[in-house]
Image (cartoon, rainbow, N blue to C red):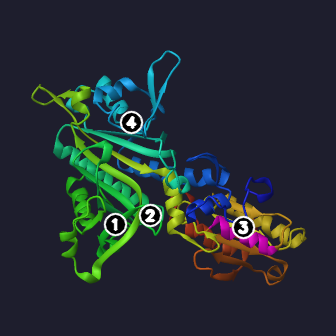
Amino acid sequence: MRLTRYFLPVLKENPSEAQIVSHRLMLRAGMIKQASAGIYSWLPLGLKVLRRIEQIVHEEQARAGHLAMLMPTIQSADLWRESGRYDAYGAEMLRITDRHERDMLFTPTAEELITDIFRSHVSSYKDLPLTMYQIQWKFRDEIRPRFGVMRGREFYMKDGYNFDLTKEDALHAYNRHLVSYLRTYERMGLQAIPMRADSGPIGGDDTHEFLVLADTGESEVFYDSAVTDIRLGEREIDYDSVDQCRAVMEEFTSLYARTDETHDAARFDEIPEERRRVARGIEVGQIFYFGTKYSEPLGATVQGPDGKSTPVHMGSHGIGVSRLVGAIIEASHDDNGIIWPEGVTPFHCGIVNLKQGDAQADEACEKLYASLSALGLEPLYDDRNERAGGKFATMDLIGLPWRITVGPRGLKNGVVELTCRRTGESEELSPETAVAKVAEIYATHHPHLQKDEPMAGRSFHTWL
């Protein structure tokens, strides 16, 4: 994308209404614009990040064997009356009436609707286990929406639901989701710690929240610092293996880590003092096992191996896709702006032309742009007639992980400058080497970008 053809309404000053870093930077970087309290329009740059995160979630759900679907944002109140939650849910539910005086609601969550789908089409234990999920807009009428997309009223969320014959099967689904979520967050450059939590209006006895440590987090968290040393990394996990999923679950949850709602001071004091940590965290996901809480009142039963009708065991699993945009910024920024991890960046590399209109610089930038694009990468070429300082400030603000700077002086020596946004370190490289290095970095995050032949050995001009 060429910046002269892009819509990027960046702001030089911090908006007065923004209280936390992610809200300020999302407004300044032209990612969102407030439509009303707690409701935002997603502008092109923000939408690209949102879609990157969504794609990672889809890929990891598919890896775990879960099936994507899509349910409506407006539901009938009748299903919620069947489950007993219509009156119990509270004022956060937006209740509406259509022209036929039927009670409807804007979906805050979809346990009732997915259970109705299940009971209409599944009748035998032979069709189990089954896990379906969607990524859809939700609405909760927060009494005081704040912090931008972190605490909005309208939000984009992945919600998944498992149906199993027995409690043991459902707990395997619970463990499988924990593994899947851990890998999802790691691919986004985040360490999300699973913490024992309160189930709230969803219900159920078993639930873990995934929290990213950040000073602006709304939850106070208590944890053993040793938990921050654990990573899934490149481990291959068989999601069908009960033992493997249970082992990962135990590894990540055996050390103490809890929110303030479930904190046990006595257990916390048993941790060696040098490892006790009290901090704040941002919730970015939660998993639940709630047994037959919804299947019994809604009649979601199957015929078991013994021929008898039995209610299925269920669980639900959510990831705040739009909230993750803010959480990543809270965890990855500096005084100059956002620092996107490679897995979610809106553009893979920025190209800065220090002397727009100079024939040699223009030609080199065009070749870099074409070369990166030919390798399946998305560069953002700042081709504006602006001063170099303004171009650098824009690139730092929007946070692209890598920047290639092109100027007449460097080109005389046959080099361009490749800069890492996270460290600020730069190196002078030939144009072809700079492109090859950027492509190799992203091959680890996007395997489909890998090529069969070594990139470093290609001629720069053959990539055009």
**Label of residue 221 in the image:** 1
Q: Name the residue under label 2.
A: 217
Distance from label 4 to label 1 (Cα)? 28 Å
Q: Is mark 4 on a helix, strand or loop?
A: loop
| Residue 377 as seen in the image, left or right of residue 229 | right
Q: Classify 10 Å Cα crowding around label 2: few (below 14), some (14-19), many (20 and above).
A: some
Residue 97, position as x, y percentages in the image = 48, 23
Q: What are the residue bounds of the magenta stretch?
A: 388-400
Q: Name the residue under label 3.
A: 394
Please tell me whether mark 2 or mark 4 is closer to you in this view. 2
Please tell me whether mark 2 or mark 3 is closer to you in this view. 2
In-front residue for pair 51/154:
154
Residue 464, position as x, y percentages in the image = 75, 61
Please tell me whether mark 4 or mark 1 is closer to you in this view. 1
Most distant residue in the top direction: 100
Q: What element carries label 2?
A: loop
